[in-house]
Amino acid sequence: MEGNEVPWGSEPVSGPGSGPCGGGMIRELCRGFGRYRRYLGRLRQNLRETQKFFRDIKCSHNHTCPSSPTGGGGAERGPAGDVAETGLQAGQLSCISFPPKEEKYLQQIVDCLPCILILGQDCNVKCQLLNLLLGVQVLPTTKVGSEESCKLRRLRFTYGTQTRVSLALPGQYELVHTLVAHQGNWETIPEEDLEVQENNEDAAHVLAELEVTMHHALLQEVDVVVAPCQGLRPAVDVLGDLVNDFLPVITYALHKDELSERDEQELQEIRKYFSFPVFFFKVPKLGSEITDSSTRRTESERSLLYRQLIDLGFLSNSHWNCGTPGQDTKAQSVLVEQSEKLRHLSTFSHQVLQTRLVDAAKALNLVHCHCLDIFINQAFDMQRDLQITPKRLEYTRKKENELYESLMNIANRKQEEMKDMIVETLNTMKEELLDDAANMEFKDVIVPENGEPVGTREIKCCIRQIQELIISRLNQAVANKLISSVDYLRESFVGTLERCLQSLEKSQDVSVHITSNYLKQILNAAYHVEVTFHSGSSVTRMLWEQIKQIIQRITWVSPPAITLEWKRKVAQEAIESLSASKLAKSICSQFRTRLNSSHEAFAASLRQLEAGHSGRLEKTEDLWLKVRKDHAPRLARLSLESRSLQDVLLHRKPKLGQELGRGQYGVVYLCDNWGGHFPCALKSVVPPDEKHWNDLALEFHYMRSLPKHERLVDLHGSVIDYNYGGGSSIAVLLIMERLHRDLYTGLKVRREQDP
């Protein structure tokens, strides 16, 4: 509802808000809040582009590899998520995401505009401080009722081209209600509109705030909220409502020389639940003149208020009660008891706002740098994978061929050696075998002790057990000697070849390693012969056939008696009928057959593995190019912007001195002092296009990542000048260590010094 146009400030305000001092304070406050809005807009833009970047990463992942398993854990790992050893696969781009906690924190910061919140010992002093801030008499300060009966509602002052007073639920909608201010002219807002009427039972009317729209320079930059009466709503609840939508710059108006018990309890609650600093200001008494601070308490003297605030934890012994810290220090609570120093509120609000922005810029830059490091490391790993995988495949093929040829040569060359080895083994073990056969105790056969003959069935069983004894002993002896003859291949081929093959199969992410299994078959054919002998393979069956022929030549007129001589005779005939040359030839023939079969299967599976890697490497190369040419440079520019925002907030824009030199990429100026470093060299670079922007941003990130070294020039920071050249272009100012001479001069002097 529109109110009548009234001339604000018809009654001059007594205090620092009026006159030149007050106008200067308002200008400083407007400048500070305007600066905050400007930098908050840049932070908001950077956050939007960062969120869009992560969305594009996710969309690119979903588009390029819809069937790749992402799982629930990939996205939750965030930028610190695990990455593959062989490179960032297309399916793993989902693990590069905005950490939810940081994103929520940053989004809340950019969504919350600042406001000045006025708390106080009573409602009169709060109204008086509001009048001092605006420099006009807006609220009545002489008659708002006693503190016990006061029902002052929450007040909000906002900017508008016309003066307007209305009731509205905070953050919701305006109430249709006729106010006293609508009914006629007035100099200050009527008390009836400021207070909640006792006989009003409408809950919405009780909770509503009085919204006052004014054409005022300060309100154009920031809203001002006056907290309701403590009895109507506690200050901690009011602050809790505000922090969800606003960044409060808290002021606390004082008019007494000490805090009451109720005041201390209120401040304790605020400190318990919130960590905001508070600007405590002692409002001068109504009608009193402003006196010079020299006639008051000296700054070294500490008042009772100051000691009470120290006890409550708001102030410390290192800060005086009459002023505030410097512009660039972190925001802390402060007590101002001299009324003419209300101008320090601009410094205090600057500290509160800057602390908020710097913390947000740091958090955003940490996200940028962390994800950028992941991209850079993974681009290196992918490039390594592209170079190493073909070499691994070639190495595997070459080494398997060498292993195959070596084993074939052994099979061809060792036949005579195997024959001699078998003959030597039989001659060496003959007597021992005969004795063992003679003393052998048969299983499942009952041998009469009186030497009586046994049946044909028992004879066959006894002969079979003697044969098994001879074969088992011969197997063991021949296998041990054969294994030792090819054992050197284990160290020459197997170890490196197996590790290389395992790496190739691991990068394919297959559950069954077929190629490795075929390689194991080749190795079993080479020096796992013992398994073949012991398991009764074809060699054993060949021996059985020869021994069966011996059995067929042994004929009896009648079944013999099983005696020691009979057992020795059976064993003797079996040993003498074995052909060493046939055994050696059979072993080598079987060895070559198994070797050829395994080699062909290995070659086929290796071709299949190579085909799989060929498709994977194509995708890896596409992803590597995307990371190197798009993702990393794009994120590097966002990182440069967030870091530059942090540096300009902390150290302001550097001042350009005399020109030191210029080159292809920029101009170098002298900078006397910046960020506590002096003297400095300032390199001004104006990137002409996106490619140069991205290259510069990556170079800046690399330089920031390097550890300090005496041979490297220190990079102190960066600032982006959006008004370079009168606003015609955007320049990146790189602030670096200033050296006494350039590289050319140093080399020239060194050359002259060398003999």
Image: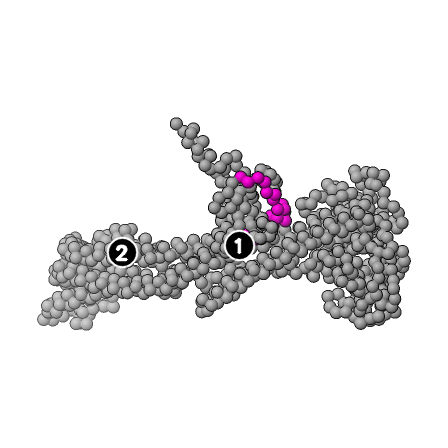
For residue 306, say whether it is visible: yes
The location of residue 682, given as percent across then percent down, is: 55, 43
- Give residue 359's mark: none
> Quick one: which residue is furthest to the top in this view?
755
Identity, as a three-letter code, of the amino acid under mark 1? Arg
> How far apart are the two marked residues, 1 and 2, measured between alpha carbons?
46 Å
Left/right placement of residue 64 relative to residue 608 reads right
Q: Residues within 10 Å of mark 1 (few under 14, many from 20)?
A: many
Q: Is residue 738 above or below residue 578?
A: above
Instruction: From the viewer's side, name the closer residue of 292 and 392.
Output: 292
Residue at image point 35% right, 57% down: 389
Location of the C terminus (image quadrant): top left
Disc on res. 637: 1
Rendering quarter of residue 242: bottom right
Side of 49 relative to 22 (left or right): left
CB under 8 Å between callouts 1 and 2? Answer: no
How many residues crowd around disc 2 within 10 Å: few (fewer than 14), some, or many (20 or more)?
few
Is residue 420 shown in magenta? Answer: no
State left or right for residue 282 relative to residue 648: right
SS at mark 2 in the image? helix
Is any part of residue 697 visible from this angle?
no
Q: Residue drawn 52% across and 36% down?
A: 739
Report the residue marked by disc 2: 398
Q: Which residues are magenta?
A: 640-660
- Residue at point 45% right, 31% down? 749
User: Measured from the top left, where is residue 97 in percent x and y?
Assistant: 53, 60
Say above or below: 439 vs 713. below
